[in-house]
Image (cartoon, grey):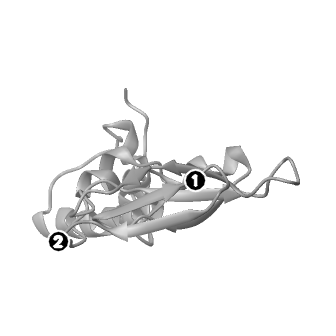
């Protein structure tokens, strides 16, 4: 049983792999990030929709139903900035590409404000892709500081 909240604030995906035992059905896993499936030798099947309830039975049959009267995708921006791994895809958006684009936008803001910046340091650790992009855009050195 898996359920995603009505606004899809947190991501939820289904992965599957062919059965190890040939007389059984598909094997499934549910996780918040699709990068979880690779080490399990699974492929990403699909995201669970906001307000959707998914049931996978012992035979590997999937049934799903929209159980929320009102649902709308409103994901938490912190998933893309701090929480998700860069190799994840959330709601059909590459986290890495999102972070690079965020770095480009922040570099433009820095240029507009003319802040006297000497070096770019990723804090917290999850900001590394954005900081690498800022460094490239501004021609500033990138350093690990903490």
Q: In this rendering, would 128 be left or right of 88?
A: left
Task: For residue 87, say whether it is visible.
Answer: no
Q: Quadrant of the C terminus?
A: top left
Q: Quadrant of residue 61?
A: bottom right
Q: In this rendering, would 104 be left or right of 106?
A: right
Which numbered marker is on residue 69? Answer: 2
Which numbered marker is on residue 57? Answer: 1
What separation in Å lies between label 2 and label 1 (alpha carbons)?
25 Å
Please tell me how crowded label 2 is: few (under 14), some (14-19), or many (20+) other residues with Cα within 10 Å.
few
Q: Out of 94 and 43, give the one closest to the viewer.
A: 43
Q: Residue at x 86, y 54 (%)?
A: 23
Q: Residue at x 35, y 41 (%)?
A: 121
Q: Residue at x 44, y 72 (%)?
A: 92
Q: Residue at x 72, y 58 (%)?
A: 26
Toward the top, the furthest residue is: 146
Q: Secondary structure at mark 1?
A: loop
Whole-percent x and y of residue 118?
29, 46
Q: Out of 46 and 125, give the one closest to the viewer.
A: 46
Toward the right, the furthest residue is: 22
Mark 2 or mark 1: whose residue is earlier in sequence: 1
Whole-percent x and y of residue 28?
62, 52
Whole-percent x and y of residue 47?
46, 66
């Amino acid at each position: 049983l898996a359920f995603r909240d009505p606004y899809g604030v947190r991501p939820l995906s289904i992965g599957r792999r062919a059965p190890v035992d040939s007389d059984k059905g598909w094997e499934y896993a549910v996780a918040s990030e699709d990068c979880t499936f690779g080490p399990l030798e699974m492929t990403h099947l699909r995201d669970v929709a906001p307000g959707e309830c998914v049931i996978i039975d012992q035979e590997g049959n999937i049934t799903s139903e929209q159980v929320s009267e009102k649902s709308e995708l409103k994901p938490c921006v912190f998933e893309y900035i701090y929480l998700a791994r860069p190799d994840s895809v959330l709601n059909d958006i590459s986290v890495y590409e999102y972070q690079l684009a965020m770095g480009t936008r922040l570099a433009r803001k820095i240029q507009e404000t003319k802040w006297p910046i000497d070096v770019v340091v990723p804090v917290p650790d999850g900001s590394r892709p954005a900081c690498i992009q800022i460094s490239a855009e501004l021609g500033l050195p990138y350093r690990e500081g903490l």
